[in-house]
Amino acid sequence: MKRTILALAALVALTGCVTYQATPATTPAPPGGSGPVEATPVACSTVPPERDAPARLETGIARVSLCNDPGHAELYGMPGPTPPADALVLDADRVAAAYNALDRAELATMICTADMGPAYRLVVEYPDGRTVQLSGEMFGCHVVGTKVGSHAVLDAFTDALVAQRATLTPPRLVLAADAVCPSPSSWVRAELADTTQGVLCTGFDAGARGEPIEGDAWQVVLADITANGREVTADDYPNDCASSEAVTLVGLTPWGEMTSLQRSCDLYTWQTGPDDRTTMGWTPGDKAKALLS
């Protein structure tokens, strides 16, 4: 399962969807053990710009939190997608295994692409208080720490986090529609089938505003998308509508992850998972259209 975002344009900060506070890292109870699992992440606002460059990651990890890399945000003005509202505390050594399996980045001889994208910071904590600040660049040479393969490490984190969530109760999503709209994206990709509410966003960037679609109304929209969504090509895009207003329909999971559908005239489009990148399209039926007007 690969739910991580693989390529993103310049993004502005997103806050207000899920509220959480940091607590000290603790070693999780083993599967089948007693006691709740503490999955609260570190506060990303406290993450330092400095990053570590380990040759290897030791196992025995207590907690891994995903944040946007603060140094990247400061240098390029790209704060990045929304981090998950929970930390990885079960099977966290999968992150170490993925990192240790990568080849060293020989930057002096490597040829890298000139694209731009976000960068993440994995805050890796051990029971004895040690912390490793591991940064991964989702562009260029895709360097993570001293290695090549930022996607592989992020996928390991994401896959383990999704598996962990199957054992936990989702948080209550505190939805702030206007906070969603300036940057409707998240590090962990949301599948439409997993969304429980939505936001209809209008406008661009910091000026975008949103209207929440919750409860039965979202279920009507989701059912219409499921029934009438189809694969589309460039020839299917309409070009004769008068409105040039930017409209995005955002679906959110209980964990705060997002998936976005861009509107062009009456056609909403989105891409499937990163493995196939199929473009899907949906024209709302009468009931759904009334909810989106």
Image (cartoon, grey):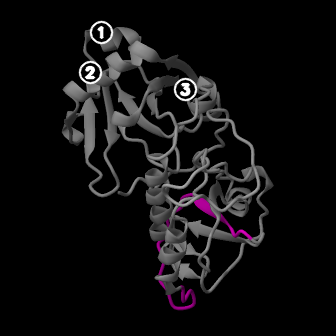
Q: In which quarter of the image is residue 180?
A: top right
Q: Which of marks 3 and 2 is nearer the N terminus?
A: 3
Which residue bears the numbered disc 1?
A: 287
Which residue bears the numbered disc 2?
A: 224
Q: Earlier in the sequence, mark 1 or mark 2?
A: 2
Total marks in image? 3
Q: Dot 2 surroundings within 10 Å: few (below 14), some, or many (20 or more)? A: some
Q: Dot 3 surroundings within 10 Å: few (below 14), some, or many (20 or more)? A: some
Whether the residues at callouts 1 and 2 have beta carbons within 8 Å, the answer is yes
Residue at image coords 19%, 38%? 235
The amino acid type of the residue labelled 2 equals Asp
Residue 288 vs 17, above or below: the answer is above
Q: Percent from the top left, x then y, of residue 105?
A: 54, 85
The amino acid type of the residue labelled 3 equals Gly
Q: Nearer the viewer, mark 3 or mark 2?
A: 2
Helix, strand or loop status at disc 3: loop
Q: Give the range drawn in magenta.
A: 105-127
Q: How far apart are marks 1 and 2 (CA)?
A: 9 Å
Q: Percent from the top left, x then y, of residue 140?
A: 51, 71
Dominant SS type (magenta)? loop
Residue at image coords 61%, 77%? 145
Q: Distance between the residues labelled 3 and 2?
A: 24 Å
Q: Which of marks 3 and 1 is in front?
A: 1
Which residue bears the numbered disc 3?
A: 203
Helix, strand or loop status at disc 1: helix
Drawn side of residue 224 relative to residue 39, left or right? left
Q: Percent from the top left, x then y, of residue 118?
A: 57, 57
